[in-house]
Amino acid sequence: MIVREVALVGDPDDIGLILSLAARRVPDRHRAAWSSQVAGVANKRTKAKAVPARPPARQSAPRPIGWWITLTLGVAATFSGATVLLPPRHEGNQDPVLAMAVAAPAIAVGAAMLLALAFASVPIAVRRSATALACAVITAVAVLAGAVFALLRQEILVGAAGAPAYVLWWVAAAAALVASVALAVRVARRGGRPTISRANRPNQAERDLAVSADRAASRLAYGTDERRAWGAVLSRDAASVDDPVRRQAERLGPFAYVAWAASAGYVDARTLDELIRRG
C-alpha cells in the first residue's frame, strides 16, 4: 500500500494561521464526522511521540574470554580424566594406581567447570558456535568411552585405587556427561527474540499515523469552486504568510492541510475539534 506523506513548510505561526482558516472551510454536513477523524490523527501523533525510538544498531558482541577459558580447561580436564582409563596399546604399560590418581580428580574438576557453564547464561557470541558445540560433543563421547572401559576394568581399578575413588569417578563422569549434553543443547539453540506487537514495532506507529492522515486528507472532495474560494481566502486573510507556505496550502487544499497539520503535531486533538466544530 502506497501512502502519501506531506511535510508542511513554514514556521508554526504561519501554519497555525492557515490551519485556522482551513478549519472553517469544512462543510457543515461533514463537520462532526470529519472532526472526529482528524482529531484521531492528532491523538495518534501524540501516541507516536511516546513510542521509543529505534534502538541503535547492535554492535558485535564482545568475545567472552572467561567463558572460553573455562570451557577449554573443563574440556581438557574431563577429556584427560576419561581417556586415561582407556586400555594402553601394550598390556602392562599402564599403572592402574596412577591412572586412577589422575582420572578421579581430573574428571571431577572438569565436571564442575562444565556444570558451571551449562547452567549459567550462555553469551550471545557463543550461541550457534561450531567450536563450542564440537567441544561439548567430543567431551560427551570421551566420557562415554571412558565409562565403558571403567566398567570393563572395574576389578583392576577398584583393586588399585579403592572403591571410593572409583565411585567418585563415576559420579563425576555422570555429571560431566549431563553438563556436556546440556551445554551442547544450549549452545546450539538460537537465542529467542522478544515478541514485539504490531503496534509497538519500530516505525509502525509512524506508519499508522501517515495512513490515517492520508485517509483524512482525501476523504472530503475538493472541487473547482472550493479551490477558487480557498485561493481567495488565502490571498485575503493570509497575505502576511510567506509565498511558499501559501502556495503549498493552496495546492493541498484546506482539508488536506488540516489533516497533515494534525499529523505533524501543529495542533492537539481538542483544539482541532473546537476549530472545526466552531467553523
Image: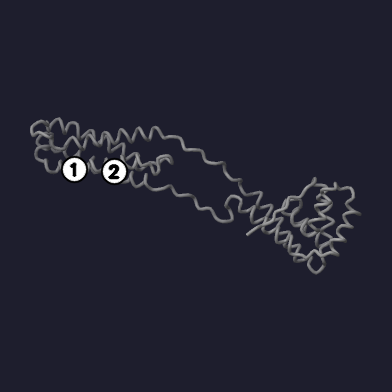
Q: Which mark is residue 147?
A: 1
- The nearer-to-camera label among 2 and 1 is 2
Q: Amino acid at mark 1?
A: Ala
Q: Amino acid at mark 2?
A: Val
Residue at image location 56% in from the left, 56% down from the top: 198
Q: Position of residue 42 (x, y in %)?
A: 72, 55
Residue 171 image-quadrant placement: top left
Q: Position of residue 105 (x, y in %)?
A: 22, 33
Crowd band around label 1 with a 10 angstrom C-alpha radius: few (<14), some (14–19), many (20+): many
Residue 70 image-quadrant placement: top left
Crowd band around label 2 with a 10 angstrom C-alpha radius: few (<14), some (14–19), many (20+): some
Q: Earlier in the sequence, mark 2 or mark 1?
A: 2
Q: Nearer the viewer, residue 55 or 115?
A: 55
Q: Which mark is residue 137?
A: 2
Task: Determine whether 247 is above or below 108 in the image.
Answer: below
Q: Quadrant of the C terminus?
A: bottom right
